[in-house]
Image (cartoon, rainbow, N blue to C red):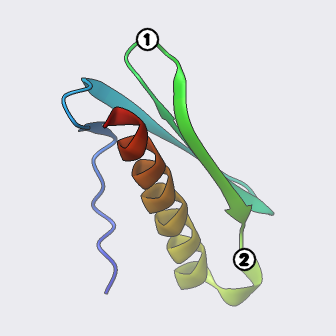
Amino acid sequence: MLDTNLDATKELGGAGLWTLGVDLGGTKVETALVDAAGLIVASHRRPTNATKGADAVVGDILDCVETCLGEGSKGAS
């Protein structure tokens, strides 16, 4: 089962609090990780598999979030 309890802010590598935004549309899901100054540190976009059902869409969102956080943690190192 997927853990969908995600904190909207996360401290990465002592870089301070960052905010993760999620844009879910009918054809794509996009995430962006923004630092305290409002600069986009990382972003990720992928198609939404809406025709495969709600579980697939949740999986798309989580994949996008995890990828974005992974990219952001590389930048915080």
| Residue 48, image quadrant | bottom right
Q: Residue at x 46, y 66 (%)?
A: 62
User: What is the total number of numbered labels drawn onto the structure image?
Assistant: 2
Q: Residue at x 27, y 47 (%)?
A: 7
Reading the image, the residue beneath label 2 is 50
Q: Is residue 46 left or right of residue 55?
A: right
Q: Which residue occupies the foreground of this view, 65 or 3?
A: 65
Disc 1 marks which amino acid?
Ala
In the image, residue 16 above or below residue 66: above
Reading the image, the residue beneath label 1 is 37
In the image, residue 50 above or below residue 77: below
Disc 2 marks which amino acid?
Ala
Q: Which residue occupies the foreground of this view, 22 or 41?
A: 41
In the image, residue 32 above or below residue 14: below
Furthest-top residue in this view? 37
Q: Is residue 53 left or right of residue 70?
A: right
Q: CA distance from mark 2 to mark 1?
A: 34 Å
In the image, residue 15 above or below residue 6: above
